[in-house]
Amino acid sequence: MRHGQTLVEYILVLVTLLGAAAAAGLLAKAIHAQTQRTDALLGSEYP
């Protein structure tokens, strides 16, 4: 019984870490896209 509980806990931690890594990746991608938009806006010739 105890062995099965440990396995489930390891799997839950792994899934949580993968979810956190995916969220961090999406955040980094969004920040990069926003930086590119800001750079394009500041670099444009619009007064």
Image: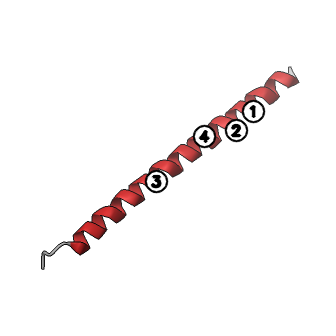
Q: Tell us which disc is closer to us: 2 or 4.
A: 4
**Which of the 4 image quadrants contains residue 37?**
bottom left
Q: For the residues marked 2 and 1, what is the alpha-carbon distance in whole angstroms?
A: 6 Å
User: Which label belongs to residue 13?
Assistant: 2
Which residue was labeled with disc 4? 18
Q: Is residue 43 left or right of residue 13?
A: left
**Outermost residue toward the bottom?**
47
**Answer yes or no: do the residues labelled 2 and 1 have beta carbons within 8 Å?**
yes
Write the residue at 42% across / 53% down.
29
Mark 2: which amino acid? Answer: Val
Write the residue at 35% across / 57% down.
33
Count numbered badges in the picture.
4
Which residue was labeled with disc 3? 27
Q: Tell us which disc is closer to us: 1 or 4.
A: 4
Rate crowding at label 3 as few (under 14), some (14 to 19) or many (20 or more) other CA atoms within 10 Å: few
Mark 4: which amino acid? Answer: Leu
User: Which label belongs to residue 9?
Assistant: 1
Q: For the residues marked 2 and 4, what is the alpha-carbon distance in whole angstroms?
A: 9 Å
Mark 3: which amino acid? Answer: Leu
Q: For the residues marked 2 and 3, what is the alpha-carbon distance in whole angstroms?
A: 21 Å
Q: Secondary structure at mark 4?
A: helix
